[in-house]
Amino acid sequence: MSGGAVSVAKKGGKIVLGLKADFDPNLNVQVNGITSKSTGNIVELKAGSKGDWNKLANKPEANTTYKFENGYTYKTDANGRVSSVQADLKLEANDRNRYQQKVSGRTDRKPDDHGGHLIASMFKGPGEGINIVPMDKAFNGSGGEWYKLETDWKKALEGNKSVKVNIQPVYSGNSKRPDSFIITQSVDSGKPRTLTLKNTATGK
């Protein structure tokens, strides 16, 4: 079936959407019942949940800004990797996508990596691939530097303080695995503080 700027076909039991040359950049697209709005290189969308993930957020396009309904904003680079995420954190859980955590980074993963959330699921971080990158499991695990950072943010939110963050993954070449993260955080409208953590067991 086809029509207008979008073609729809069934391939291998899956529904495949194709964008034609006359594709209108200002378009509402519904995938798995989740509506996303595209305006040029800006996509407004809603995070999915178990059994109903937003496929548009699993494979982000290059040089695009993705704005989720909770205000979390992700920007991608020329390779479709997340170059920054900005969020006014909320202490509210979101579903985890175990599959996306398992495949994140694929061949660029290291043996001690697992799929880590840029914005933790306890802060309403999306479970889709756009929010997951390969992280050293000790770095992201209990007692690790990334874990400690998330714990500090959680305590601040539990104390009714606001927490705003900007996280910039830093990559080498075309790798999908960040070498490090530049984190700028502001707690309760305080002076922004920036730190850099390496994607290693020690964070250094």
Image (cartoon, helix red, strand yellow):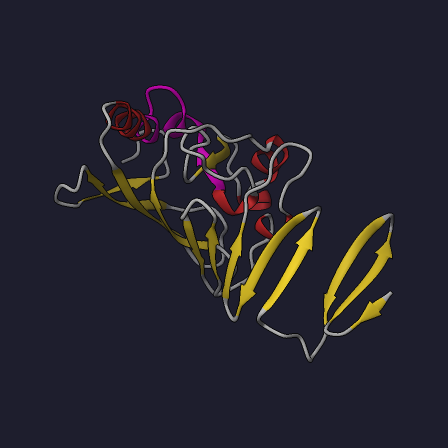
Is 58 located above or below residue 204 in the figure?
below
Q: Quadrant of residue 8?
A: bottom right
Left or right of 76? Residue 4 is right
Left or right: 183 in relation to 64? left
Magenta span? 132-147
What is the count of numbered marks? 0
Q: Position of residue 55 (x, y in %)?
A: 64, 48
Q: Residue 135 at what x, y percent from top left?
A: 44, 36
Taking 71 as reference, is 2 left or right?
right
- Residue 100 location, x and y as percent? 60, 38
Q: Nearer the viewer, residue 160 or 73?
A: 160
Residue at 57 percent across and 49 percent down: it is 57
Asked whether residue 138 is drawn in magenta, I would say: yes
Place residue 88 in its image quadrant: top left
Quadrant where the image shows the N terminus: bottom right
> Residue at 57% across / 60% down in the picture?
37
Q: Residue furthest top?
A: 142
* Quadrant (top left, top right, bottom left, bottom right) of the C terminus: top left
Residue at the image position 33 percent from the left and 45 percent from the top: 181
**Could you tell me residue 9's position as x and y percent?**
84, 60
Is 63 in the magenta?
no
